[in-house]
Image: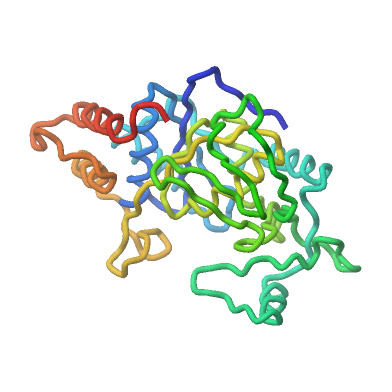
Amino acid sequence: MSATTGAAGRYVGRFAPSPTGPLHAGSLVAALASWLDARAHGGQWLVRIEDVDTPRCVQGADHFILQQLATCGLVPDAEPQWQSARSAHYQRALDQLVAHGHAYPCACSRKDIEDAQAALGHARERHAALPYPGTCRHGLRGRTGRSWRFNATDLKQKEALPRDGYAPSAINSIASHVLQWCDRRLGPQQQDVARSVGDFVLHRADGLWAYQLAVVVDDADQGITDVVRGEDLADNTPRQILLQQALGVPTPRYLHTPLVCGANGEKLSKQNGARALDLGNPLQALSQAAEVLGLPALEHPHNNHLGDAQTQWVAAWRRNYNGSP
């Protein structure tokens, strides 16, 4: 596949909500952070509706989210994109991975994986999926394929990213199957993808496209240079970097933001009952999000207009993250 490559110094960021319900306090933090980073670098800010997991999507939530963003003064610089309209792009990427031996069909169900791991003495941890043990990596052995997986064990040391890559220092090395990269906020990171995750799914058994493939294809096609998102998604980064390398597309820079946690100490989310944003006072909601991001309080909180507040936050963001990514 081909990617849209920006000119030197060009910045393109994005906010990519899933329309499983309205925005809540946690998702506003991610939206504001990505918008501020784009504005702080004089770049373009896009919105992508990640509705590839259709059973979880709520009818009308996509347009409601766009309305919430507009109420907060967070308006994308181009028409939003919907993943549900891009199946052909994901198919072409999968075909490319298969043709180059990076992907293979898998016949395993979740129970098959649990049974295989149990036989190895491994039990599933709470909130964590069991790594795929590679059962079908070398053939289906007469079974029928249900999904397609990426071969995460096929890691090759690369001296440098392609010349058109956005982040030449994002990948430090791949050694002993450990992928190392640097997050703009979290600093140096590493993960053994094969051991931690295993060969991950690209096309699901229910016929839907997996998030990992869809997000990599979309980021490449939209020319995304910087991904700013919640810290809970940092674990996805190494898988996405591997896919970017396998597809020959640039690797963006990554910045993962602090999370908003509920009363139980877990990440605030729609799944654990997060309430929809109360936008009767958009400035107050944004101020709370800015506080989570470590930005200073507004100079005149009761007299600020939304635009004035955003100008102050952009300047503070630029100071916190040193202007250029």
Q: Tell me where residue 16 appears, x and y as whole percent.
A: 48, 42
Q: Is residue 184 above or below residue 179?
A: above
Q: Tell me where residue 78 appears, x and y as whole percent.
A: 47, 25
Q: Residue at x 11, y 37 (%)?
A: 301
Q: Residue at x 61, y 44 (%)?
A: 173
The quarter of the rendered structure image containing the C terminus is top left
Res 91 quadrant in image: top right
Residue furthest to the right:
142
Residue furthest to the top:
7
- Residue 284 horizontal side relative to residue 237, left or right: left
Q: Tell me where residue 145 appears, x and y as whole percent.
A: 81, 62
Res 259 quadrant in image: bottom left
Res 303 quadrant in image: top left
Total labels drawn: 0
The quarter of the rendered structure image containing the N terminus is top right
Q: Tell me where residue 183 appears, x and y as whole percent.
A: 46, 43
Q: Is residue 214 above or below residue 146?
A: above
Q: Residue at x 77, y 48 (%)?
A: 102
Camera-side residue: 166 or 148?
166
Q: Is residue 50 above or below residue 153?
A: above
